[in-house]
Amino acid sequence: MKIDDLHSTFLEALEKKIPQKTRLVEILMDCLSIEKGAVIRRLRGEVPFSFFETVKIAIRLNISLNDVVQPGVAPIDHFALTIIEYTDMSEIYYKQWEEYIALIRTAKNDPDSEIAESSNILPLAVYAGFGSLSRFFIFKYQYLFSSSDNRKSLGDMAVPERLNQIFKSYFIESKYFAKTILIWDFMIFRYLITDIKFFSGINLIAANEIRQLKTDLFALLDYLEKMTLKGYFIETGNPVQVYISDINLDADYSYLQFNDIYISHVRSFILNSVASTDRSSFYKIKEWIHSIKRTSTLITQSGAVYRTDFFDKQRSMVSEL
């Protein structure tokens, strides 16, 4: 189905749900927190609803997006691969990120909001507050997705300030959920350090950049150890549970639940993800993440010996750089 057809079908679903035009405008103003003129332009088809606007409206009005995308077809789980070209950021990509952050920002209004992630790669919500680490992951992305003629060294790669600010905003806003569960592969830092050594070995990371990465890695470990000792995020005071998996995790899964919004993700291509707003997919991923806790050790406000040993080992590995 073409984008224009999708928009028309969604508008038809809105009008069918709320036939009174004035009432529909009022509901959308409240749901999207935008002005009346902006709502009217969307209803006229002059400006399309963004993905996250569509999700919020569908949840608020109990509209099945499956019926919009494939009317008359039996419901199935829908995952969408969200691709952002981090080495060639356009306004569209910036808007995708900014809309997503604006959406999760509303989680602070829900006392039952919840976010969870099982990771074998350091999550963005953990390292985005540390500049050289964010830069390294973007560098790794461009190395893998650029042709050999276009590959840049870490020192030659510039990260736009707007993207830096987006990462920093996400670092903060992701910590306002009422409940956070993080499960990390016990090799999570080893994988990162192995990557850094590889790029250093092919002369794409200079000695001074290695020193900066080490500095940020030590600072990150200090930050995480303090967080796990206290059992809450330093920035917000919201509780967090951190587990270390005793088995290797095959992939990165996450889910977010707030204000009757249900989103699940499977990480792909380092910095992108496959996303779904389908409830059954959400509950499958939630069940999977919670099942991993059975083979994991809780290190927040408990497991003092295990926690100390874990962080000592990570610092020892960072010292190898």
Image (cartoon, rainbow, N blue to C red):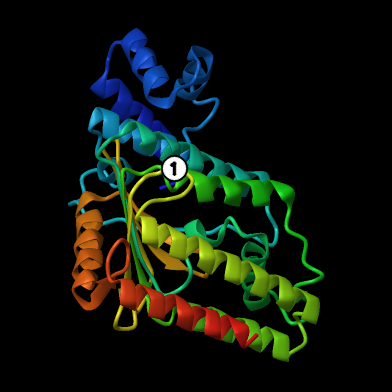
- Looking at numbered disc 1 in the image, what kind of residue is underneath it? Thr
* Residue drawn at 48 percent across, 69 percent down: 122
**Can residue 150 be seen in the rendering of this structure?**
no
Is residue 309 or residue 262 the one in the foreground? 309
Nearest the camera: 300 or 290?
A: 300
Specify the quadrant that holds the C terminus. Answer: bottom right
Observer-nearest residue: 108 or 56? 108
Going by the image, does 210 lie left or right of 257?
right
Q: In the displayed structure, would residue 291 be above or below residue 86?
A: below
Residue at the far top in the pictured view: 22
Give x and y (percent) for residue 186.
38, 80
Q: Which residue occupies the extreme right position in the image? A: 156
Left or right side of 317 for 33: left
- Residue 30 occupies which quadrant of the picture? top left
Residue at the bottom extreme, as displayed: 201
Kindly identify the residue that appears in the image at 39 percent across and 80 percent down. Answer: 309
Q: Quadrant of residue 217?
A: bottom right
Q: Residues within 10 Å of mark 1 (few under 14, many from 20)?
A: few
Q: Residue drawn 75% across and 80% down?
A: 205
Task: Find residue 223 and report its horizontal and vertical position in percent.
Answer: 51, 61
The correct choice, above or below, for 276 with respect to 149 in the image is: above
- Assign a secondary structure to mark 1: loop
Can residue 63 be seen?
A: yes
User: In this rendering, is residue 209 above or below 124?
Assistant: below
